[in-house]
């Protein structure tokens, strides 16, 4: 059985909600978002989560980091983190 698709809006809402639940200095892993949306096949959501994180970062609503440096989620290779923008 194929899992029901998850909309970009739902991914964005979940990502921002998870950030709201953390302290302003904390970050989340994209897998936190994927697991919150789908317990069984969360890995299949990872490309969509990275894509949505890139869009939110372009809008100034979050930052995507790798080893503490701001990066583009879709072009970054390896683990990334998502955080609120730093002032």
Image: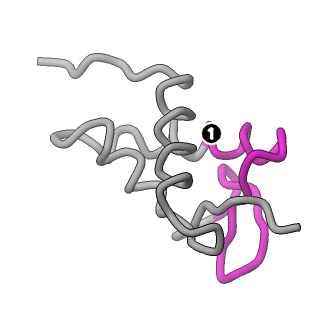
Look at the image and name its color scheme.
one colour
Give the answer, above or below, for where 35 lies relative to 5.
below
Q: Nearer the viewer, residue 69 or 9?
A: 9
| Residue 58 within the magenta-colored segment of the rendering | yes
Quarter of the image for residue 34 reads: top left
Q: Dot 1 corresponds to which residue?
A: 51
Residue count near mark 1 (Cα–Cα under 10 Å), binned few <14, some 14–19, many ≥20 = some
Judged from this view, the residue extending furthest toward the left is 1
Relative image position of residue 9 (x, y in whole percent): 55, 23
- The residue shown at (69%, 59%) is 84
Quadrant of the image for the C terminus? bottom right
Left or right: 11 as drawn, with respect to 2: right
Give the answer, above or below, for where 49 lies relative to 30.
above
Give the answer, above or below, for where 83 lies relative to 33.
below
- The residue shown at (47%, 20%) is 7
Q: Nearer the viewer, residue 38 or 26?
A: 26
Relative image position of residue 19 (x, y in whole percent): 55, 55
Relative image position of residue 76 (x, y in whole percent): 67, 62
- The residue shown at (65%, 82%) is 67
- The residue shown at (19%, 19%) is 2
Give the answer, above or below, for where 86 lies relative to 31.
below
| Residue 56 within the magenta-colored segment of the rendering | yes
Region of the chain picked out in magenta, as a range: 51-76
Q: In what element is the residue under mark 1?
A: helix
Judged from this view, the residue extending furthest toward the right is 87
């Amino acid at each position: 059985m194929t899992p029901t698709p998850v909309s970009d809006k739902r991914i964005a809402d979940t990502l921002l909600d998870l950030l709201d639940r953390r302290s302003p200095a904390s970050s989340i892993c994209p897998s936190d978002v994927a697991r919150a949306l789908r317990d069984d096949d969360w890995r299949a959501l990872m490309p969509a989560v990275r894509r949505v994180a890139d869009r939110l970062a372009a809008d100034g609503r979050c930052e995507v980091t790798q080893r503490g440096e701001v990066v583009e989620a879709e072009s970054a290779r390896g683990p990334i983190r998502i955080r609120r923008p730093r002032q």
